[in-house]
Image: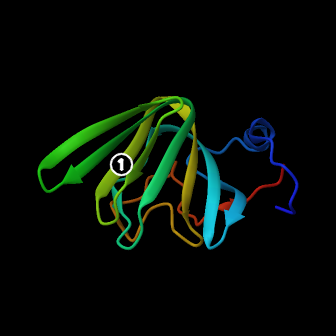
Amino acid sequence: MNGAPIALDRAFASFDALWSPRIVASVNDYDVRVAKVEGEHVWHVHDDTDEFFLVLGGELHIDLREPAGERRVTLPQGSLFTVPRGTEHRPYAPQGARILLFEPTGTPTVGDRHDEIPAHVDATTGHPLHA
């Protein structure tokens, strides 16, 4: 993050961990994170911030629990979606996906409130990219 361009293919090639985002850039007080995902994340809520998802490869599903009931959003490659703050949600990718997240620096991947965290989910605020 020294002002040089970031090659996202190279960034993704630098790690294998699933559900363990890498910080590829900072924009003001926000992190731009990339992650490889497969299987289910955990139901969670970000009380004070929206969560932005951009699918760079594969397909991501996001289950949402809203006042009107539960619904599923399907995001094919090239799609984006913002989960509004305070909305309980669970991302999952049955076949695997590569995603980009945009959220305030220090935002935990498992939100402010969450179900029990499974072993395959990294509860983090993002890891530095070592590409």
Relative image position of residue 129 (x, y in whole percent): 77, 55
Considering the numbered disc 1 on the image, is that residue within a helix, a strand or a loop?
A: strand
Between 26 and 119, the residue placed more toward the observer is 26
77 with respect to 35 (left or right): left
Which residue corresponds to the image point at 11% horizontal and 51% vertical from the top-left?
68
Between 95 and 31, the residue placed more toward the observer is 31
62 with respect to 30 (left or right): left
20 with respect to 130 (left or right): left
Residues packed near mark 1 inside 10 Å, few (<14), some (14 to 19) or many (20 plus): some
Quadrant where the N terminus sits is bottom right
Which residue corresponds to the image point at 81% horizontal and 39% vertical from the top-left?
10
Relative image position of residue 113 (x, y in whole percent): 34, 69
Find residue 105 and report its image quarter.
bottom right
Relative image position of residue 19 (x, y in whole percent): 55, 48
Which residue corresponds to the image point at 41% horizontal and 51% vertical from the top-left?
82
Q: Which residue is mark 1?
A: 90
